Image: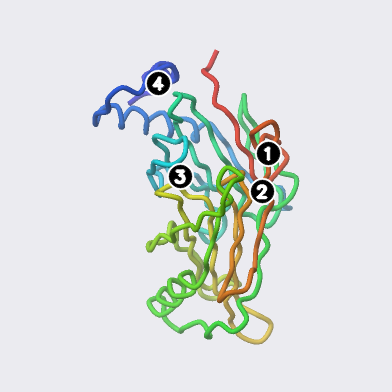
């Protein structure tokens, strides 16, 4: 499908009413989602100005039966050693409005260039913490993957949905991404998601890092929601964020979590 056809689909999908669905409808929406993220160029603001690589296919396609999203997808930009640096959620609401949510998975500021909707978070979106009390990372990739899944399962995450009630989020059993390289500071790692219905509300990075004395596990959370969110590990709260909204939307492009409505191209 060429760019002209995708833009035509985009313009028509913007005003399309949700009356029935078909495989062609779903494919057209996915093509539009891919076009939205392909229009961004993302790089770090560190000394190396590293360009992040967009994965062309989404890591998840979802809907939210209790929320406003009728169709959405999650895309990743990868940095060094394949570690996810940015997550973007593109979705079509039930009122036929398209929107995007960006979440920084980087420890430093970055720049996402776009001719209409640039995103320039002034600080990193994550802070790694050591998982004290976790078992020592295994020697093989298979062992470490089993350990990461087991560690992820020990987290409980809640979302203060619409500012009314705390909703427990369901952990997805399969990771969104696997990264790392033996011999570097990041030996192994994985990105996990916590969802409301099938809509991601929080992201969790777990990685084996070369510590000062021996390899150790560490973790970091990032939001995929503008509502308040919190996480606990083995019964102790380890991460929380307040609600982040501006006139009903987390709309400050200088923040590491950013939501924007996608307007039709002029």
Q: Nearer the viewer, mark 1 or mark 4?
A: 1
Q: How is the image coloured?
A: rainbow
| Residue 196 location (% of width, % of height) | 45, 50
Residue under label 4, please give it.
13
- Tell me the crowding category of disc 3: few under 14, some 14 to 19, or many 20 or more residues within 10 angstroms, Cα based: many
Residue furthest to the front in view is 164
Residue 113's place in the image compared with 17, above or below, is below
Q: Is residue 216 left or right of residue 198?
A: right
- Place residue 129 in its image quadrant: bottom right
Residue under label 1, please give it.
245
- Tell me the crowding category of disc 4: few under 14, some 14 to 19, or many 20 or more residues within 10 angstroms, Cα based: many
Q: Which mark is residue 149?
A: none
Residue under label 2, please give it.
44
Q: Out of 75 and 248, give the one closest to the viewer.
A: 248
Mark 4: secondary structure: helix
Mark 2: secondary structure: strand
- Tell me the crowding category of disc 2: few under 14, some 14 to 19, or many 20 or more residues within 10 angstroms, Cα based: many
Q: Residue at x 41, y 23 (%)?
A: 3
Q: Nearer the viewer, mark 2 or mark 1?
A: 1
Q: Nearer the viewer, mark 2 or mark 4?
A: 4
Tag 3 and tag 2, C-beta contact below 8 Å:
no
> Which one is earlier in the sequence, the residue at label 1 or at label 4?
4
Q: CA distance from mark 2 to mark 1?
A: 25 Å
> Which one is earlier in the sequence, the residue at label 2 or at label 4?
4
Residue under label 3, please give it.
74
Q: CA distance from mark 2 to mark 4?
A: 33 Å
Residue 193's place in the image compared with 93, above or below, is below
């Amino acid at each position: 499908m060429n760019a002209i056809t995708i833009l035509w689909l985009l313009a028509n999908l913007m005003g399309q009413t949700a009356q029935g669905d078909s495989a062609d409808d779903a494919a057209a929406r996915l093509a539009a989602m891919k076009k939205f993220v392909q229009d961004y160029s993302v790089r770090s603001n560190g000394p190396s100005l590293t360009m992040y690589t967009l994965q062309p296919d989404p890591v998840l396609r979802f809907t939210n039966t209790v929320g406003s999203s009728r169709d959405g997808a999650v895309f990743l930009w990868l940095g060094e050693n394949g570690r996810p640096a940015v997550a973007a959620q593109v979705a079509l609401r039930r009122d036929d409005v398209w929107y995007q949510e960006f979440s920084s998975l980087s420890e430093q500021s970055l720049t996402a260039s776009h001719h209409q909707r640039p995103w320039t978070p002034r600080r990193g979106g994550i802070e790694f913490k050591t998982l004290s009390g976790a078992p020592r990372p295994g020697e093989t990739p298979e062992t470490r993957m089993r350990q990461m899944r087991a560690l992820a399962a020990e987290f409980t995450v809640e979302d203060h949905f619409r500012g009314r009630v705390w909703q427990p989020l369901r952990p997805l059993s399969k990771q969104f991404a696997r990264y790392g390289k033996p011999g570097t500071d990041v030996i192994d790692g994985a990105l996990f998601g916590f969802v409301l219905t099938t809509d991601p509300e929080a992201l969790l990075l777990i990685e084996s890092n070369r510590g000062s004395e021996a390899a150790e596990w560490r973790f970091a959370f990032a939001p995929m929601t503008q509502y308040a969110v919190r996480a606990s590990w083995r019964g102790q709260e380890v991460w929380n964020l307040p609600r982040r909204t501006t006139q009903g939307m987390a709309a400050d492009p200088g923040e590491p979590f950013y939501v924007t409505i996608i307007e039709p191209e002029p």
